[in-house]
Image (cartoon, rainbow, N blue to C red):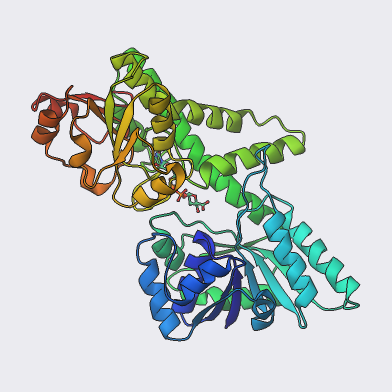
């Protein structure tokens, strides 16, 4: 089948790679001509395991093309995905400008019926706005009878595992105007290659599909914030949150997933989506007490490691150097959006300290955000980050940090302390090397 995907960010690009890999013909459209020129040469601008190879293979096979020509994109397919960004507005609500620009464009250029699919994470009611924008253009052009449908089909892939999640989804949500209609049939056909062993397609109305996306992310964020609060309590009352985690995760109603305490959730989804749903709730006269607490706890959690460092080394950190392991908001990505590492670095700098950071993938992203500054060294290896440092702070649980040479760490640090923001290290084992572990809730 022929499809066009507007937006070549994480969502659009991963979707394009997966759709073309199962045999669909995909045209990717982006207004960023530089990015398109790079993609045409097989240069994938983000790090996502498996993505680059998939893009190159399918480009070579002629099933995946990239263009900055938007009208050509509209003409290329009857199925159009909108996968452009929805950055937060100042009040936390999602900014729909780019989504509505694509809608406007489709309405201005379409010559035959289209199925327009919202893949971007958009607030409840966006499909109605897209429909209105397309319709307005068609009316202007005297084509009011030209048919089109707007579908909500949210994505649920995780950065770092996006290709696998897209290829083997837990569920495929189709929010359609008319259940059982032609649009649903077309989408079932489109998704058939991803829906093989058992039926993962859930058909529902458009608004329920839109809300499902936010509800899923907010529920996951709530699990994390709840655990972070329990960790705080465990710290104060002398319990070990890691024991508690196992104690409660064994209940299948709770489960082991997403109950890892840490330095707070980051990334481009949870923080933004929680705030956007708070804003939607307020717009509808609801006081979103649960979600506000989730957000507030997370903001506090992001400063926790710094508070622990200050409690240990005092408020004036002038002349001190801290090794920092992990910049990305989680492993297997180079994404540092809303990463807890940034909150920590900025607080350390404000208190006069220097940072020697290492991350397996996110060093370029860090350089782009912070540029050259005398209080930041991007170390070539995780071991080099320790040289001359007072203590080590671990923020992201990359695999290479899991079983480091503890003796070397103890030898290199001026003070044998690790601030373990992910409870990666066993305090008893570390103690055998003379290292003190200051973790989260233990
Ligand atoms: C999240 C969702 O997990 C995806 O299902 C969703 O599709 C995606 O948002 C999206 O809306 O696009 P992602 O942001 O890539 O995916 O990352 P997660 O793996 O969910 O992690 C989010 C944050 O929570 C990370 O900072 C991670 O360190 C933190 N986390 C996760 C914890 O602190 N504890 C946990 O137990 C789990």
Q: Quadrant of residue 182?
A: bottom right
From the top left corner, tell me how far across and down residue 71 is, in percent.
70, 77
Total labels drawn: 0
Residue under the point 29% across and 21% down: 319
Name the residue nearer the viewer: 121 or 191.
121
In-image side of 399 versus 281 (left or right): left
Please indicate, yes or no, whether residue 238 appears anywhere in the rendered image: no
In-image side of 124 versus 212 (left or right): right
Name the residue nearer the viewer: 61 or 383.
383
From the top left corner, tell me how far across and down residue 231 is, in percent.
37, 24
In-image side of 222 versus 313 (left or right): right
Compared to residue 49, the image places residue 272 above or below, namely above
Q: Quadrant of the N terminus?
A: bottom right
Name the residue nearer the viewer: 298 or 124.
298
Compared to residue 275, the image places residue 186 above or below, namely below
Q: Quadrant of residue 83?
A: bottom right
Please indicate, yes or no, whether residue 10 appears anywhere in the rendered image: yes
Residue under the point 74% across and 52% down: 125
Residue under the point 51% across and 76% down: 192
From the top left corner, tell me how far across and down residue 95 is, in percent.
68, 49
Q: Residue furthest bottom?
A: 62
From the top left corner, tell me how far across and down residue 262 is, in percent.
37, 33
Q: Quadrant of the C terminus?
A: top left
In-image side of 108 versus 116 (left or right): right
């Amino acid at each position: 089948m022929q499809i066009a995907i507007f937006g070549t960010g994480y969502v659009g690009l991963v979707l394009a790679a997966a759709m073309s890999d199962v045999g669909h013909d995909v045209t990717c459209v982006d207004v960023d001509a530089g990015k398109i020129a790079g993609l045409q040469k097989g240069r994938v601008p983000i790090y996502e395991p498996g993505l680059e190879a998939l893009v190159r293979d399918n480009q070579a096979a002629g099933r995946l093309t990239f263009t900055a020509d938007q009208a050509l994109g509209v003409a290329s397919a009857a199925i159009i995905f909108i996968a452009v960004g929805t950055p937060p507005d100042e009040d936390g609500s999602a900014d729909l400008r780019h989504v509505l620009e694509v809608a406007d464009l489709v309405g201005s250029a379409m010559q035959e019926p289209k199925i327009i699919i919202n893949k971007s994470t958009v607030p409840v009611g966006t499909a109605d706005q897209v429909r209105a924008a397309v319709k307005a253009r068609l009316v202007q052009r005297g084509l009011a009878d030209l048919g089109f449908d707007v579908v909500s089909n949210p994505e649920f892939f995780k950065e770092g595992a996006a290709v696998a999640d897209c290829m083997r989804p837990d569920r495929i949500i189709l929010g359609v105007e008319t259940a059982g209609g032609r649009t649903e049939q077309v989408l079932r056909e489109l998704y058939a290659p991803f829906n093989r062993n058992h039926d993962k397609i859930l058909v529902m109305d458009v608004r329920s599909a839109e809300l499902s996306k936010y509800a899923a992310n907010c529920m996951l964020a709530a699990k994390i914030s709840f655990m972070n609060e329990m960790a705080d309590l465990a710290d104060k009352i002398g319990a070990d949150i890691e024991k508690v985690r196992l104690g409660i995760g064994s209940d299948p109603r709770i489960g082991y997933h997403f109950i890892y305490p840490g330095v707070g959730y980051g990334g481009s989804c949870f923080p933004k989506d929680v705030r956007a749903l708070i804003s939607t709730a307020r717009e509808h006269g609801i006081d979103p007490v649960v979600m506000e607490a989730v957000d507030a706890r997370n903001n506090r959690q992001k400063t926790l490691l710094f508070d622990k460092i200050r409690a240990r080394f005092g408020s004036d950190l002038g002349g001190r150097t801290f090794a920092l392991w992990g910049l990305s908001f989680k492993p297997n990505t180079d994404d540092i959006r809303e990463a807890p590492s940034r909150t920590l670095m900025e607080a350390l700098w404000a208190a006069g300290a220097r940072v020697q950071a290492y991350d397996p993938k996110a060093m370029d992203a860090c350089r782009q955000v912070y540029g050259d500054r005398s209080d930041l060294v991007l170390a070539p290896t995780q071991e080099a980050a320790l040289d001359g440092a007072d203590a080590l702070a671990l923020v992201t649980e990359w695999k290479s940090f899991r079983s480091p040479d503890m003796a070397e760490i103890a030898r290199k640090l001026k003070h044998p302390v690790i601030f373990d923001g992910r409870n990666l290290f066993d305090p008893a084992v570390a103690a055998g090397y003379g290292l003190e572990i200051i973790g989260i809730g233990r």
